[in-house]
Image (spheres, grey):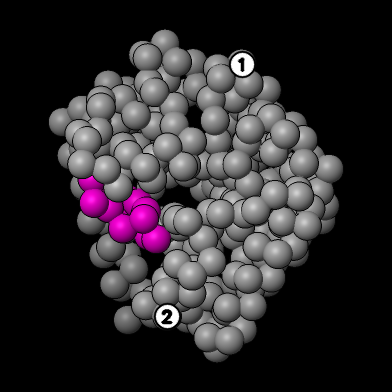
Amino acid sequence: MLTILTYHSIDNLGLSTSVRPERFTAQMAFLADHKYKMLTMDEAVDLLNSCRPIPPHCVAVTFDDGYRSMYTVAFEQLLRYSCPATVFVTSGHCAKLSNWPSHAPEFSTREMLTAAQLRELSASHITIGAHSVNHHHLTHLPLAQAEHEIEDSRVALEQMVGERVRHFAYPYGELNDDLRAFVRSRFDCACGSDLRLATNGADIYNLPRIDAYYLDDLLRLGGPETRAARTFIRVRRSLRVARKAATRDDGSRY
């Protein structure tokens, strides 16, 4: 099994998308001390597509949205532990704030990565991926508009970093068959938000990931692959599915 971790912002705001800097440092240290093999996204996809058994203790680290704290806080620790990572960037908010239309006010004040920072990250072997232009709920948009959100993000980021952008993450983990097909025509893989460990034969255009919000609990249970940790993940996934089933698309409850 392969653990693909999802981080967002490394800060002290205490939000659901926040991990405190000292906890991020401790988590990277735990993975290094316990000899986890840290994979690039390309290596993770190659392994999942292969017939080879996935070795124990394989992890790929991802960051969604493109918060500047990925550069100002996390980058130092990634370098310290020789940990590759992929950052999925909301291109329309580069060098701005995280105040896209679907964000609640308490989530909307964080600074975002600049083009210069993206280039520095890319030069240091951090993979730059796309996360749409404006972080809309893509499944709520007309298909043509959603496709522009995806494609325009890819093009803009390629212009910023001077390299092909080959990976995508769906905002809010939301996709349908049409969006998946479009992403497949433009990218080498895509990440979703299904709360599971990845296994051989996983859909590489909707890869499951583990929210870093749960990582401290998983580490206390010995790491994401232990029996106790896998039970914890299953319970959390069931609760998440139940919450989504009880909530209409517009956010109101049945």
The percent position of residue 207, horizontal first and vertical second, equals 37, 53
- Which amino acid, mark 2? Asp
Q: Is residue 240 above or below residue 20?
A: below
Relative horizontal placement of residue 182, taking residue 158 as reference (left or right):
left
Can you tell which quarter of the image residue 213 is in?
A: top left
Please state which of residues 243 and 99 is positioned toward the viewer in this rendering: 99
Q: Is residue 37 above or below residue 175?
A: above
Spatial separation of the CA atoms under disc 1 and disc 2: 41 Å
Residue 162: x and y in percent read: 76, 50
- Which amino acid does the dot numbered 1 rest on? Arg
Q: Say which mark, if any, is on residue 80.
A: 1
Give the position of the N terminus as an image quadrant. top left
Looking at the image, can residue 133 be seen? no
Looking at the image, which residue is at 42% across and 37% down?
43
Q: Position of residue 235 (x, y in %)?
A: 22, 48
Residues shaded magenta: 194-208
Residue displayed at 77% across by 41% down: 119
Camera-nearest label, 1 or 2? 2
Q: Residues within 10 Å of mark 1 (few under 14, many from 20)?
A: few
The part of the image, by quadrant, that contains residue 73 is top right
Q: Residue 94 appears in which quarter of the rendering?
A: bottom right
Q: Are marks 1 and 2 in contact (CB under 8 Å)?
A: no
Residue 118 is covered by the magenta coloring: no
Residue at 63 percent across and 71 percent down: it is 151
Position of 233 compared to 67: left or right?
left
Which residue is pictured at 49% across the width and 70% down the height? 185
Main secondary structure along the magenta-highlighted residues: loop
Disc sitting over residue 178 in the figure: 2
> Looking at this view, is 107 or 140 the one in front?
140
